[in-house]
Image (spheres, grey):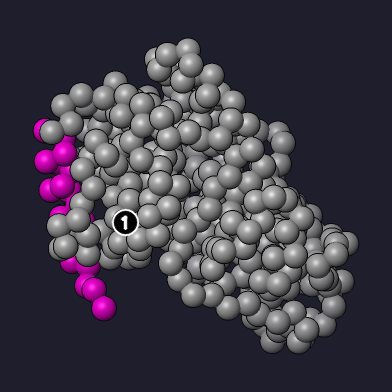
Amino acid sequence: MLLSICVLILGGCAQSGSAPRQSGSGERINTTEGMVDYLKKQNLPALKDVHLWENDYGQGLKITTAHYEIFTTLLEPLMLRDLPGFFESAYRGYNNQLPERIETTAKFTVYLFGERQQWEDFTKGFTGSQADMYLKLKAGAYYLNGSCVGYFIGRERTFSALGHEGWHQFNSRLFKYRLPSWLDEGIAMLFEVSQCKNGLFYFDPDKNLHRLGDLKITLAQAKMIPLRTLLAINPGQVLATDNDYSVAAFYSQAYALVRFLREESYGKRLSNFHRLLRDGLNGRWQIGDVNKAIAADRNIPLTIPWNEQVGVLLFEQYISNDLEAIEKEYMFFCRKIVYHVRLE
């Protein structure tokens, strides 16, 4: 059973599904049938089909794209109009992390609820004995057993959470080996900020002010996690401390580390980064038979010893075994990317 939670330390609000909706053109849409007709008339490039979704949680739609099936009770026309383009753009962006494109014929499943109560009712049945843990999530989304599950918390934050969890969904299905936490979470955060142009989305990792702000605070307070430790820990260990500063430090530093490997010195380490991901995709890591078995079996929970060993080992094999030297470069990069960030 594979799970992931997008940690967004943000408040959220659900929107009621009872009032008539109004499209950007001023057209009032009073029924789900009307919403189906509205979406079909938009000539959206990423939309393949849309139907009514019969469910126990509220009026809903099933939206189909080339790579996704989106089940939603969110009936806001402007948001629904952008969902197909967002997910197909995210799929393209996830592929762009790799040296060559990969394809899948089986569609990814997403549940997006219009109200938190609907999300809670679904989550209680979907997560079973783990429900109490998931219901503590204040805002965001989670990935579990092949599906992304979220609820509406405002346009930008909803897309941020879905972009993050979508990466976990993508690599969990298509990669032969699971990724160590620093790499998995670091890449996921590249998809938390986006902008829409002509129905498609473009991701802006360098504009992720939430993570950049946390990184700047961590640097200012001299609470940076040492590189070797960062490579070895996982979010569960950090969350268990119940310390918001530790959580912010881990996520912001993992985000910065992936950006460092992709961007620093005009991408001098990008080919090594690509090779690391390609070998994980194809099951070619040299990490020992026991670690390979755990990496290949998503039904085995991510263990602390596995993450500690493999997280460091892969970095040393593919990036550098001189952690002290590269940590100095990484710290310089962190200071550089937060230099112009203003804290409120």
Q: Amino acid at mark 1?
A: Ser
Give percent across and percent down for residue 50: 80, 59
Residue beneath disc 1: 246
96, above or below 32, in the image:
above
- In which quadrant of the rendered image does the N terminus lie? top right
Give percent across and percent down for residue 229: 27, 39
Q: Is residue 341 magenta?
A: yes
State the image quarter where residue 134 is shown.
bottom right
Q: Residues within 10 Å of mark 1 (few under 14, many from 20)?
A: many
Residue at point 54%, 48% (across, down): 4
Give percent across and percent down for residue 144: 63, 46
What secondary structure do most residues of the magenta stretch adopt?
helix
Residue at point 16%, 39% (across, down): 327
Q: Is residue 261 magenta?
A: no
Q: Is residue 253 left or right of residue 325?
A: right
Relative depth, front residue between 184 and 295 = 295
